[in-house]
Amino acid sequence: MAKFGVLETEPSMAGKATEELKKELQRLVSRIVDEDENCVDTTDRAVRILCALRDLKFKGSLDFRVEMENLALPQEFRCPISKQLMRDPVVVATGQTYDRAFIQKWLTEGHRTCPLTQQVLSHTILTPNNLVREMISEWCKEHRIELPKVVENVDEEVITDIDRGYLNSLLGRMSSSVSDQKEAAKELRLLTKRMPSFRALFGECTDAVPQLLSPLSPDAVDVDPDLQEDLITTVLNLSIHDNNKKLVAEDPMAIPVLIESLKSGTIETRTNAAAALFTLSALDSNKHIIGKAGAMKPLLDLLEEGHELAMKDVASAIFNLCIVLENKGRAVQDGAVMVILKKIMDGILVDELLSILAMLSSHQRAVEEMGELEAVPCLLRIIRESECERSKENCISILYSVCFNDRAKLRAIREEENAYGTISRLAQTGTSRAKRKANGILERLNRIASITHTA
């Protein structure tokens, strides 16, 4: 989305701006009162001016967009595509001037005509229009407006009214026939994958997410699997955009729909639902929302099923959620230790799942379950055979918790140490954390041996 400059106003400039805005507000209010039918656009402009007056009073600054809307911007300074003040005016082969970012986007999309004249362009070289740029600069100075910065990243920054209109039309089709819904959903999936600007567009409209997910509402029956897959994948694409994470997670419908999609649909739907939860859980506030909504059990069920396509995304989502204390408790209560330990014993996704198990080892009940499920021999074998230092570190960290919780498990560790010197070797060659944990276990073993010898 295009970013706008902010005008920092001096007292005299603020006074002049205030007077201009008040006059415009008076004119708009008169129009609203006099018109038989209240015009929404007029009311919206009046509200924006009130907000601008508040900003001037309390912040001493003015939003560039409001300033632009209430000044008579010369037509020749507007880009014919965006209808906004040009930041970096350039001339195309036909002699027409456009803002570089918008005409570049037009050309990148494959067009080879001039948008204004529809003439075929003999070439696509963009020549800076220094004269117009200088005129815009002078006009901005005269009206005490900060010249807006040049857009550098076209894909991420440029959003046109055409884009907005197209998004609205696609979302509108979500309340149409199933064939219309499927066609629109497929297009939204492609656009949100390819165009960061389209992902950003969703943040402009508070109703966009509910509209998108309306075909998957709880009262919907016999949802088409392809439609579900495209919509869930669109949510995944949206969640990649940082500004959308909060928007999506706080929508009352989004997380429940993602959780339901973990349970049913194509394997790609279920995988992408897990990936979306993982991406959204990057925000701590979202971790609480997702955990409280009941995502842990369906994630663990999907992990237990063992679909190769889904497991990495599922494991990543579980790991992120378990960073929050209450979600650790939910994971343990929902059977995480047994599911994860079984996968590790089967040699599946060992490194990733050990990270989760190490995180859960700070939970008392989880440690007890690890002891009951004979985790110790498995963890010792991984330390002995694995080449991954992170996995060895996680194993010894878990063992440290288990053996300090249940002294009986020290016997198996002592037998391992006597046979292979596994713990001693790790205390010498492991990561700094692994060395600390290994030395802690060795000290415990030596203390017990000393007490036994004395006795």
Image (spheres, rainbow, N blue to C red):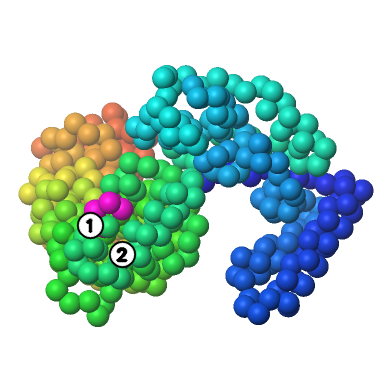
Q: Amino acid at mark 1?
A: Glu
| Residue 267 placement (x, y as % from top left) | 13, 56
Q: To which residue does mark 2 refer?
A: 173
- In the depicted view, which residue is nearer to us: 246 or 51? 51
Q: Examine the residues drawn in magenta and state their main secondary structure.
A: helix
Would residue 447 be visible to someone looking at this image?
Answer: no
Percent position of residue 5, x then y: 68, 43
Q: Nearer the viewer, residue 131 or 384?
A: 131
Magenta-span inclusion, residue 280: no
Q: Could you say whether the residue bearing mark 1 is in a helix, strand or loop?
A: helix
Q: Which residue lies at the image location 79% right of the left edge and 45% below the top edge?
A: 8
Q: Which residues are magenta?
A: 185-189
| Mark 2: amino acid | Arg
Report the Cα–Cα distance between label 2 and label 1.
9 Å
Q: Position of residue 211 (x, y in %)?
A: 36, 67
Please tell me which residue is depicted at 17% across the width and 45% down the height of the picture: 350
Disc 2, SS: helix
Residues at circles 2 and 1 in contact by the CB criterion of under 8 Å? yes
Q: Nearer the viewer, residue 104 or 188?
A: 104
Indicate the quadrant containing the C terminus: top left, top right, bottom left or bottom right: bottom left
* Residue 17 circle label: none
Could you say where residue 124 lies in the image, as x and y percent from the top left? 43, 22
Q: Which residue is mark 1?
A: 183
Q: Residue, x 28% and y 29% (percent of image)?
A: 429
Dot 2: few (<14), some (14–19), or many (≥20) neighbours within 10 Å?
A: some
Determine which quarter of the picture holds residue 195: top left
Query: Extreme left residue here?
Result: 346
Of the two numbered discs 2 and 1 on the same chain, state the one appearing first in sequence: 2
Query: Which one is nearer the viewer's eye here, 448 or 121?
Result: 121
